[in-house]
Image: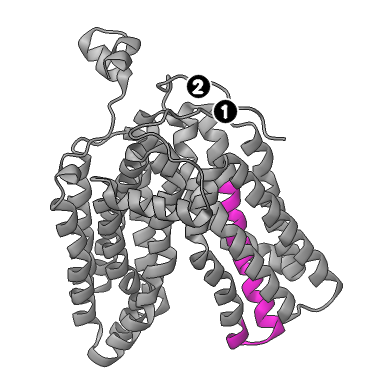
Amino acid sequence: MITPESDLPERATTPAYRDGNVLRWLAAYTASLVGDGVYFVALGWAAQKAGGPTEVGLVMATGALPRALLMLAGGVVADRFDPRRVVAGSDMLRCLIILAAAASIAMTAPALWILVAVALVFGVVDALFVPAVGALPPRITSADQLARVTGMRSLSARLSQIAGPPVGGLAMGLGGPPAAFMVAGLLFALSLPLLLTLRMRPLPVRGAEQPEPGTARKELLDGLRYIRGHRLIGPLVVACAVSEIGLTGTLNVGMVLLNAERGWGPSGYGWIVGSFGAGAATSAALLAALGRLPRAGLVFSGTLLAGCAGAAVIALVPALWIAVVLAATIGLTMGVCSSLSSALIQIAADPAYLGRVTSVVMLSIVGLAPLSYPLVGAAIGAWGAAPVFVGCGLFGSLGVVLALASAAVRRAELPRNPSRVAARAGETPRDVAEED
């Protein structure tokens, strides 16, 4: 049973990394992400046993397709209902789906139709989970802690990406796909009691009076109009989408082909990807510790430009060690850029539209950006890695141009911590909050 909303202070009295409410949410989120990693390992290996490479691709695509197609609808659901209910319900459904798959596969050999059905339903539920989990942070802490929470969330995602596959592999080694599916289901179940004990704050309505609830289609169109008309969120969403489309293909498919072209091999690829992840994790940890960066809009634009420049020239460097150092720099700058954009959007968004805003942002990552994969692969095959990396870096830099063209982005700031402001001014945090 979901507990009723509890009143939280208007401003957080402790940093997010010492706030039990935030830490419970972070633990639930981490358990879900590790469960995701274990699930994908189990699904891929089970599909390989049931068929071959073609079947593995089919099963994985079956899960990705509904996730992308229904992401916007998931944003409508997150805004219409309590996002905590949606996240908890999604994890409960994923737990039941995965445990049922474990039982089915344990009783018989993995059947392709079972895996396709599991991937399809899992993708649908994931389309509900992603926007809701993005709309949740403003409900569990105050605006001045959102940048710190974003950093903590990014760090959790990086560590979960490291932990999930080995846990899945260990479970596969001990008991095959049924054991791995069971571990994934238990991790999803672990998140439920943590989510149900969260204290929530009802956010005040900002801006215009809330529209009357309508059909799902009407609410979706209202959300798109809201994003397009918002002077800060609109430019940020477009800038991030353009940079994702420009850089995702080269930093994923392109990096594999670059290593093959240079003769650096799988170990070189591992060093580059690991270095990128370490840089991104470092940026997340720094933001979680600092909580606020001044001139956030300009820092966002500057780090995005640095990341695009690094992605453009990494194919031009002569030695592997330089590419590894450059990859760490790209991870660091793009991590800061991503965290700042997420925090600024969550702070600026009307709470009634947070789910839909999150769904549009995530659609550009899981839906639009992967469309560049075959194009990047074909282009590198035709012209080589260097010109394609440079071209994609320049295309991603268009996002910087779009961001700097917006006065709202250039002037964007993160909220100040009232305790620090009060200490400098000789006032109490309550006085500062009232002045804000």
Is the stretch drawn in magenta largely helix, strand or loop?
A: helix
Per the rendered image, the range of residues in magenta is 30-55
Instruction: Tell me the crowding category of disc 2: few under 14, some 14 to 19, or many 20 or more residues within 10 angstroms, Cα based.
Output: some
Q: Is residue 376 left or right of residue 88?
A: left
Amino acid type, residue under disc 1 in the picture? Arg
Q: Is residue 158 visible?
A: no
Question: Which residue is located at x 44 percent, y 35 percent?
Answer: 138
| Residue 41, percent from left and from top | 61, 68
Circles 2, 1 touching at the beta carbon (< 8 Å):
yes
Quarter of the figure with the N terminus: top right
Q: Say if 246 sits above or below 137 in the image.
A: below
Q: Which residue is mark 1?
A: 199
| Residue 260, percent from left and from top | 35, 84
> Which is more toward the observer, 8 or 206?
206
| Residue 36, percent from left and from top | 59, 59
Dot placed on the residue nearer the N-terminal end, 2 or 1? 2
| Residue 330, percent from left and from top | 27, 59
> Which is more toward the observer, 174 or 397?
397
Per the image, label 2 sits on a secondary structure element best described as loop
Q: Which residue is mark 2?
A: 8
Question: Which residue is located at x 54 percent, y 28 percent?
Answer: 20
- Separation of residues labelled 2 and 1 (CA atoms): 7 Å
Say whether residue 50 is magenta: yes
